[in-house]
């Protein structure tokens, strides 16, 4: 189940439930080998993924688009509380439209039956166009995310 809401200030909030424990869901956000499998569109290729998952640590990914151009995504971890919460900044080079730095907060809630509820809050989005792009991108990522998690 996925639910998306939007606030007046171009904030994107998405909820999803996964049939996996919080620890596995958190690992999929913090292990560079796992994140490279799901955090990109189906037609994008992850060229590199570097992650220093600690408060103040940096992350950076290079992605090749289908047209051959390269998108660079990067940021800094602001908060890391395993296996509950992850807060990081998000920037990109090569994106159209160009947008300011945004902040992504991922919160994981333990549910019964070894399930996890993920809440993603993406703030600082500056336009309707950017909001639509991020909503579509995160939706595609969540579809791939499920395939990254271990089977129960």
Image (cartoon, helix red, strand yellow):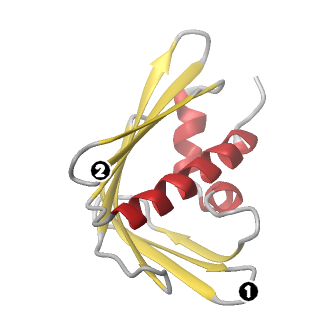
Question: Which residue does the numbered mark 1 point to in the structure image?
Answer: 67
Question: Which residue does the numbered mark 2 point to in the structure image?
Answer: 11
At a point 64% along the width and 52% down the height, the residue shown is: 140
Name the residue nearer the viewer: 13 or 108.
Answer: 13
Locate residue 31, reporting x and y percent: 58, 55
Q: Cβ–Cβ below 8 Å for labels 2 and 1?
A: no
Mark count: 2
Which numbered dot is residue 58? none
Farthest-out residue, left: 9
Question: Which image quarter is the N terminus in?
Answer: top right
Compared to 60, does 103 lie above or below?
A: above
Q: Quadrant of residue 65?
A: bottom right
* Mark 2 surroundings within 10 Å by alpha-carbon count, few (fewer than 14), some (14 through 19), many (20 or more): some
Question: Which image quarter is the C terminus in?
Answer: top right
At a point 62% along the width and 87% down the height, the residue shown is: 70
Locate residue 130, reporting x and y percent: 40, 66
Locate residue 36, reporting x and y percent: 66, 63
* Mark 1 surroundings within 10 Å by alpha-carbon count, few (fewer than 14), some (14 through 19), many (20 or more): few
Q: Quadrant of residue 45?
A: bottom right
Name the residue nearer the viewer: 55 or 120.
Answer: 120
At a point 61% along the width and 59% down the height, the residue shown is: 39
Q: Earlier in the sequence, mark 2 or mark 1?
A: 2
Helix, strand or loop under label 2: loop
At a point 56% along the width and 58% down the height, the residue shown is: 137
Q: Is residue 95 left or right of residue 63?
A: left
Compared to 19, does 125 lie above or below?
A: below
Q: Is residue 44 left or right of residue 23?
A: right
Estimate the spatial distance between the alpha carbons at disc 2 and disc 1, rounded to whole Å. 30 Å
Farthest-out residue, top: 112
Helix, strand or loop under label 1: loop
């Amino acid at each position: 189940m996925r639910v998306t809401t939007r606030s007046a200030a171009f904030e994107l909030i998405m909820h999803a439930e996964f049939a996996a424990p919080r620890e596995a869901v958190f690992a999929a956000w913090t292990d560079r080998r796992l994140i490279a499998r799901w955090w990109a569109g189906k037609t994008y290729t992850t060229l590199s993924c570097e992650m220093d998952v600690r408060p103040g640590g940096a992350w950076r990914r290079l992605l090749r688009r289908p047209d051959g151009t390269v998108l660079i995504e990067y940021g800094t971890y602001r908060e890391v509380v395993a296996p509950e919460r992850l807060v990081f900044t998000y920037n990109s080079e090569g994106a159209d439209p160009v947008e300011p730095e945004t902040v992504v907060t991922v919160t994981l809630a333990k549910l019964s039956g070894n399930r996890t509820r993920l809440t993603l809050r993406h703030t600082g989005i500056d336009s309707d166009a950017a909001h639509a792009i991020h909503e579509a991108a995160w939706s595609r990522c969540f579809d791939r995310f499920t395939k990254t998690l271990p089977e129960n």
